[in-house]
């Protein structure tokens, strides 16, 4: 239902992202509730972005010629006259992700995109690029909102809190949304829209305290706990027909995470903190998640774009056939544009939302999304186990931002040494020393 005659202009920063075409198709599907006048892509890799941009041009011409579309590497052109900036960049691309995963594994430490030393390395790379995008947005479109999902979100959000505290930036994550869609399926409902929830934690580091059927108010925790204790969040069947092998393992491993703390239901990312030895034992140091993506998601997405350009039509494309996961981003834009006050998770300064965490901790908690920003909902007290884990993890995240601000080797070493995934300060040092030359184009010089 159209609420007024406004139409919005959106720029996707990271136009060359593997998630971009799926997101555009989701935007087009939702024109009745979030109408658009313009879609732009911005990327600093012209060649990569062109491959996605040319395919999307065909999609736009066929399906929504009334919406202006362009892609550019010029910041002024990209960020002028926009209402929403979507942050979907990967600084250093898959080349650097691969090193984030492989360098820690050299020393028997878990190698993962957003957790442990790899996650901290990635966070340090992202800070200056995200701050730059915020500054361009504020210069060229001062009323715009940035919805950022470029990782490492916890570190980016802490940098935003310190360096751009008044900027209109909301840092979000889709992992809980994905898990809640699985929870809905387990309980015979459709997706996350059917659930009410209470959740708290840090990004990629949290727990559900409660899950209810949104319509009836029925408490779904007993049924979910019973299911998760055996199967984790693995649904299987048609629902999981496109789920890759490593994600299958992750969803199943949630059963072991649940076993450790059965009062709540865990985010899948807890596996890296509860069972690091298992993760390392299970990993192949020469073939990590990045290699799987290069062979699967990246290949499929770019292959499909090439096919669309070659055939000159986007009929029967892969994003029409498979449900995409970016609908929650449209939900969020809609909530902000129309001041709906709907509840989603966001990464924000705590300020009492978790009663026994510091006010300046960045936490991931339910918030009401309005046209004036996000308003956190109090989630009560963290359990003693969770609080201990969060205090350690968020200190690592703060130390990374200290390292960025102070160009400090010592702070980055401390961040690695304190992390639950790293057993020893010397191991931390070796990982850091291997990462420094590789990250030279992106990190400040650490002295
Ligand atoms: N928060 C979430 O829930 C969630 C979910 C999925 C992906 N992600 C994140 O979304 C981002 C994109 O993921 P992907 O796998 O599609 O990555 P990708 O590598 O396919 O695409 C990222 C794009 O960003 C571009 N880029 C890198 N640095 C840039 C800069 N400084 N300015 C402009 N563009 C830049 C690259 O050229 C590339 O085209 C990553 O940060 C990833 O971690 C977050
Ligand atoms: O290894 P990747 O690149 O596949 O995934 C890393 C990201 O994982 C989460 O996002 C998932 C999401 O939960 C799932 O539903 C589907 O949409 O795929 C996403 C990306 O694969 C996580 O929330 C992100 O922050 C990670 O970047
Ligand atoms: Mn995430």
Image (cartoon, rainbow, N blue to C red):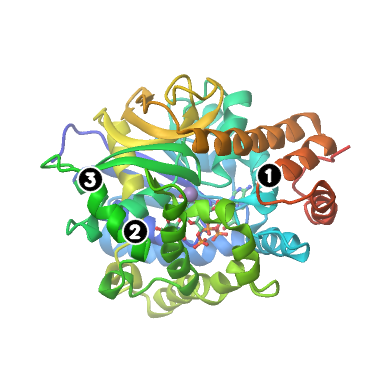
Residue position for label 3: 195
Name the N-terminal-most of marks 1 and 3: 3
Residue 419 - label: 1
Residue 258 seen in the figure: yes
Label 2 CA crowd tier, 10 Å (few <14, some 14–19, many 20+): many
Q: Residue at x 50, y 47 (%)?
A: 204
Which quadrant is the N terminus positioned in? top left
Task: Judge by depth and name the residue closer to the eye, 189 or 389.
Answer: 389
Corner quadrant of residue 339: top left
Which quadrant is the C terminus positioned in? top right
Residue position for label 2: 228
Residue 83 position (above or below residue 283): above
Corner quadrant of residue 380: top left
Between marks 1 and 2, how big is the CA–CA gap? 27 Å
Residue 91 position (above or below residue 145): below
Name the N-terminal-most of marks 3 and 2: 3
Task: Judge by depth and name the residue closer to the eye, 282 or 308.
Answer: 282
Between marks 3 and 2, how big is the CA–CA gap? 17 Å
Task: Judge by depth and name the residue closer to the eye, 108 or 155.
Answer: 108
Q: Secondary structure at mark 1?
A: loop
Looking at this view, name the residue that lies furthest to the right.
447
């Amino acid at each position: 239902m159209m609420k007024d005659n406004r139409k919005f202009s959106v720029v996707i920063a990271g136009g060359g992202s593997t998630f971009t075409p799926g997101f555009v198709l989701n935007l087009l599907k939702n024109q009745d509730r979030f109408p658009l006048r313009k879609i732009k892509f911005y990327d600093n890799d012209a060649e990569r972005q062109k491959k996605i941009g040319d395919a999307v041009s065909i999609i736009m011409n066929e399906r929504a010629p009334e919406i202006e579309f362009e892609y550019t590497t010029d910041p002024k052109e990209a960020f002028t006259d926009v209402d929403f900036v979507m942050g979907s960049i990967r600084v250093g691309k898959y080349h650097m992700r691969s090193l984030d995963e492989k360098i820690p594994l050299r020393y028997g430490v878990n190698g993962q995109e957003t957790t442990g030393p790899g996650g901290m390395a990635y966070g340090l790379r992202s800070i200056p690029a995200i701050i730059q995008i915020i500054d361009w947005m504020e210069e060229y479109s001062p009323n715009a909102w940035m919805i950022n999902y470029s990782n490492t979100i916890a570190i980016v959000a802490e940098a935003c809190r310190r360096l751009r505290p008044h900027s209109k930036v909301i840092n979000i994550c889709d992992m809980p949304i994905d898990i809640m869609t699985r929870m809905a399926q387990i309980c015979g409902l459709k997706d996350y829209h059917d659930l009410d929830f209470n959740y708290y934690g840090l990004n990629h580091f949290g727990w559900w305290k409660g899950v209810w059927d949104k319509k009836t108010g029925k408490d779904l925790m007993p049924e979910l706990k019973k299911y998760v204790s055996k199967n984790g969040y693995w649904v299987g069947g048609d629902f999981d027909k496109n789920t890759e092998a490593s994600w299958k393992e992750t969803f199943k491993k949630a059963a072991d995470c649940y076993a450790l703390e059965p009062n709540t239901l865990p985010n899948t990312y807890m596996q890296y903190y509860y069972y690091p030895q298992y993760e390392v034992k299970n990993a192949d140091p020469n073939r990590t998640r990045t290699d799987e993506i290069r062979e699967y998601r990246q290949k499929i997405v770019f292959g499909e774009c090439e096919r669309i350009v070659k055939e000159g039509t986007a009929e029967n494309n892969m994003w029409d056939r498979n449900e995409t996961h970016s609908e929650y981003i449209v939900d969020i834009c809609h909530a902000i544009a129309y001041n709906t006050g709907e509840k989603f998770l966001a990464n924000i300064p705590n300020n009492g939302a978790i009663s026994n965490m510091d006010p300046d901790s960045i936490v991931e908690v339910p918030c009401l999304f309005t046209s004036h920003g996000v308003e956190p909902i109090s989630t009560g007290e963290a359990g003693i186990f969770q609080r201990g884990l969060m205090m350690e993890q968020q200190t690592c995240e703060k130390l990374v931002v200290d390292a960025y601000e102070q160009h400090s080797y010592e702070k980055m070493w401390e961040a690695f040494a304190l992390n639950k995934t790293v057993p020893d300060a010397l191991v931390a040092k070796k990982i850091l020393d291997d990462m420094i030359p590789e990250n030279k184009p992106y990190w400040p010089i650490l002295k």
